[in-house]
Amino acid sequence: MFDDIIQAAKQNNQTDSVEQKVVEPVDEFDSSNVRINVIGVGGAGCNSVDRLMRQGIKSARTVAINTDGKHLKFANAHKKILIGKTITRGLGAGGYMDVAKKCAEL
């Protein structure tokens, strides 16, 4: 899934030479164009999104994605997506990566 990204990162990794760039300080920063999306996948990801929301993060849009409908119901997120409903019947993947992968591919 991420093989192409990893391969590109390896090709762009230049450990032989270090290029230093001077960055000018910015007096004003226009944050009106900044968009932050936090996407939590699975139980741990949904817990992370839930914690961010409970901490009062207001500048980010949050999305929780899970195969477990009950866990998703109690997650605090702007948007919730239940995946693999026909495979797991909303009961979760049980930690089985192959089941979770099938759910994500639907």
Image (cartoon, rainbow, N blue to C red):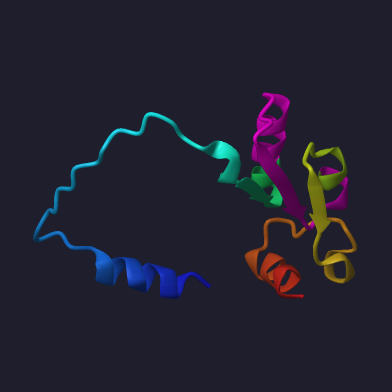
| Residue at 79% over, 36% down | 76
Whether residue 1 appears in magenta in the rendering, the answer is no
Instruction: Give the number of callouts.
Output: 0
Q: In the image, is residue 66 part of the stretch drawn in magenta? A: yes
3 relative to 52, above or below: below
Return the x and y of residue 59 as percentages of the image width and height: 65, 35
Image height of 54 relative to 24, above or below: above
Residue 74 percent coordinates (x, y): 85, 38
Q: Which residues are magenta?
A: 47-71
**Displayed quadrant of residue 90:** bottom right
Foreground pick, 3 / 70: 3
Residue at image coords 88%, 43%: 73
Identify the residue at horizontal 26%, vertical 67% (top origin): 12
Residue 8 lies, in percent from the top left, at 34, 72
Q: Quadrant of the C terminus?
A: bottom right
- Residue 55 lies left or right of residue 24; in this view the side is right
Q: Quadrant of residue 105?
A: bottom right
18 or 9, which is in the foreground? 18
Residue 35 in picture, x, y percent from top left: 60, 46
Q: Along the horizontal axis of the image, is 36 left or right of 54?
A: left
At 66% from the left edge and 32% from the top edge, which residue is drawn?
52
Q: Residue furthest top?
A: 55
When the figure is inspected, residue 76 is found, relative to residue 21, above or below; the finding is: above
| Front residue (pair 105, 88) | 105
Q: Is residue 32 left or right of residue 91?
A: left
